[in-house]
Image (cartoon, grey):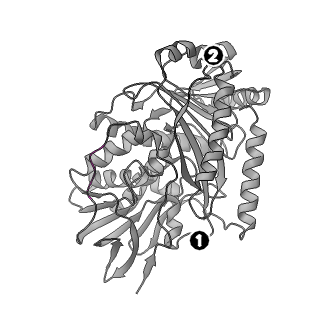
Amino acid sequence: MTAYTAKRLPRQTGTAGWNAILPLQQALPELTEDHTADVTIIGGGFAGLSAARRLEQLDPTLKITLLEAGQFAESSAGRNSGFMIDLPHDLASDNYAGAGFDADRAAITLNRQAIAFASDVAAECDLPQEMFDPCGKFNAAATRSGDRHNRDFAAHLDRLGEPHTLYDRQQMQEITGSPHYTSGLFAPGTVMIQPAAFVRALSSRLAQNIGVYENSPVIGFERQGNGWVVKTTKAKVTTGRIILANNGHLESFGFYQRRLMHICLYASMTEPLTPVQIKTLGGQPRWSVTPANPMGTSVRRISGSYGDRILIRTCSSFHPTIETSPMRLRNAGWVHDRKFRERFPHLADVRMEHRWAGMLCLSRNGSAAFGELDDGVFSACCQNGLGIARGTLQGMGIAELLAQGGSQIADHFLAQPMPPRLPPEPFASLGANSYLIWKEWRSGKE
């Protein structure tokens, strides 16, 4: 009998700030009784939710069960910084440009399909603009090398025929209120999401028609006849097919062993700014910045029903265990405080209210872990640091592969080569963490 057992379950470090600043949500049920399903989806992030929605669109007669190990929006999806990016965004490059013109053109087309899909969700769920805002974002530079990265990326976008605008130091300060930035490259196609609000809204909407369960971690699944039995801590689901949409925890079930890199990113969010602090800061009430160097610091200013706040995201570490420690989070928080003071020296009295960590899954060659892994067991995992756009795409693609045998999106991921193996431990951890430290040091003031 074929059986797969989870060797670990997801564990989060720090309270997800995006979720904490929202009103208390109505809990979705926990799976406590056995039942049957045509398709069972393991993982309630962007990939799993998108797969469920796309399956519902393709075949409304399917009986679908969606299982989330923890609380919706407290998982990695709710810890995302909220950039749904349409343009090439290669984190291993110096300026985000991808592997080449044709590959970047194809990536843009696919990313915009994901954005259109998510836009339909936002409209159906009546998400306000503060939760789903097609406002674009800036690549912000703070050094000469960063300025050069922006110019190089602008030239690449010219060749792609993509609109963009370059801003100088004064214009960036007028927008952000920060004297830190020397230039900015504005790209209009990015959608800025309140990730916890989006995940809450879609999971609640899906729960009207399918079985959606939280706090229901899957501890294993095994073949039974022509189908499978999925076991949680309290019940089981007899199902025809399984979709694994649990990103790095795909490896926890024994798949893609030693081929996935588990990287933790850290974020801090301020307390609500007072009217005096808002006046002192100046700038626009909402803006979003990714660093000109991909290993630099991302910053968002948000405003709305949860007040005016600023988010800082930087620092990264490699963790084969797929979890980090409170000490690592505390150390990252000290860096966040320093980065905040560098960018906003006129806001010395502002304090951080929330700090959290979130796991990414990457492969050495940028390939996804996508496709049919066993008879009736499918994977939509390894988003390579682009959780919202790539997770949405993979969810759509795996649903199309399962329900109709394929699609343009599915073919894109199926054509990617297998992620290569990682070096053995401790060399993988030593090498990866040394590389991340060097890249962060090299990014300097970015």
Establish if 264 lies above or below 283: below
The type of residue carrying mark 1 is Gln
Q: Find residue 387 and report its horizontal and vertical position in percent.
A: 50, 48
**Disc 2 or 1, which lies upstream in sequence?**
2
Prevalent SS, magenta region: loop
At a point 49% along the width and 30% down the height, the residue shown is: 271
Q: Find residue 329 and report its horizontal and vertical position in percent.
A: 60, 48
Report which residue position mark 2 lands on.
Answer: 173
Please, what secondary structure does the residue beneath circle 1 have?
A: loop
Q: Mark 1 packing: few (<14 Cα in 10 Å), some, or many (20+)?
A: few
Establish if 49 lies above or below 355: below
Reply yes or no: does residue 27 show up in magenta.
yes
Q: Mark 2 packing: few (<14 Cα in 10 Å), some, or many (20+)?
A: many
At a point 72% along the width and 55% down the height, the residue shown is: 433
- Name the residue nearer the viewer: 413 or 82: 82
Report which residue position mark 1 lands on.
Answer: 257
Q: Residue furthest bottom?
A: 1
Q: Residue furthest front?
A: 349
Span colored in magenta: 25-29
Reply yes or no: does residue 412 show up in magenta.
no
Quarter of the picture holding the N terminus = bottom left
Please, what secondary structure does the residue beneath circle 2 have?
A: helix
Select label 2 or label 1 by which is in front. 2
Residue 96 visible in the snapshot: no
At a point 34% along the width and 76% down the height, the residue shown is: 228
Establish if 225 lies above or below 75: below
